[in-house]
Amino acid sequence: MPRVTTEITDHIAHVTLTRPDKRNAVDPEMAEAIVAAGQALTEADIRAVVLSGEGQSFCAGLDVMSFAALAKGDPEALILPRSHGNTNLFQEVAMVWHRLPVPVIAALQGAVYGAGFQLALGADIRIAAPEAQLAIMEMKWGLIPDMGGMALLPRLTRSDVIRRLTYTARPIAATQAEAWGLVTEIAEDPLAAARDLAQEIATRSPSAIRAAKRLIAVAESGVGEDAVLMEESREQAALIGQPDQMEQIAANMAGRAPVFGKRG
């Protein structure tokens, strides 16, 4: 069975972790499959991604047994090389989704631990089931989070929250995660809610959605007010009067759904 499946319907990519018997725990093959799935969507004609896990849990973290074998080798040789731009394979598990040009919505249920938590952080939006449990689990194994979490967490929550989660490895409920800014919203059926939101996003101008994601990334990067304001202007100038914007206006005026052309 494949570790990850991707199905594209109506310009929405549905990416599913498919190792439910192991609570979608990440072994080396799963890490490779997650990254490959994200990379395959970089140039795809899509408008949103729904990222989910099959079975009772989104992803319960690393498959400890499979990585124990890797630990017998040289750890520096395993994790220090930058194999994917500025990341290694394990960091790219989260960062590939962060870098996708379209919005990524993660549907979370059950255990969202360690690698699974950091994978979820790579999404733009996280919708969790009420019973979902989230944790930075690495300290339980005498490790630190090293799969992109420290690049992504400071954009979402306070330093003291990050430290508490990291130092204790204690799982928190979805309600607490929402209060701390780690979960966007809670839904009884997070996958259905994620799909509904993706469908809504897919009705918006594809070029404007991509521009918005780029602009938000610039705004979050700490480049300064002047640079953010200039980027606003650049992105807006590139949208005004172009086919996607004109179709959005025409559809609004006619009271119909817009029909956008293929990207590019």
Image (tube, rainbow, N blue to C red):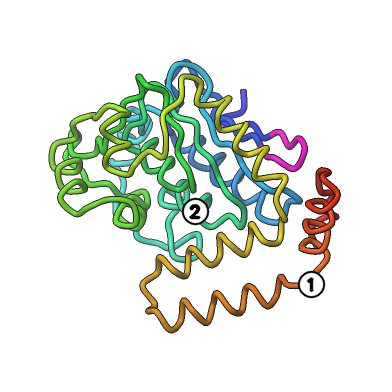
Q: Position of residue 234 (x, y in %)?
A: 61, 79
Left or right for 258, reference 172: right
Query: Per the image, is 213 magenta?
Result: no
Q: Can residue 7 be seen at all in this image of the molecule?
A: yes
State the predominant SS element of the stretch in magenta: strand
**Helix, strand or loop at mark 2:** helix
Seen in the picture, residue 123 relative to 235 is either above or below; the reply is above
The N terminus sits in image quarter: top right
Residue 220 higher or lower than 52, as above or below:
below
Q: Which mark is residue 241?
A: 1
Tell me the kind of residue under disc 2.
His
User: Position of 261 compared to 181: left or right?
Assistant: right
Q: Residue at x 27, y 50 (%)?
A: 157
Is residue 77 at all visible to an observer of this figure? no
Tell me the mark number nearer the camera, choosing from 2 and 1.
1
Magenta residue span: 7-13
SS at circle 1: loop
Residue bearing mark 2: 98
Which image quarter: residue 209?
Answer: bottom right
Q: Is residue 38 above or below residue 21?
A: below
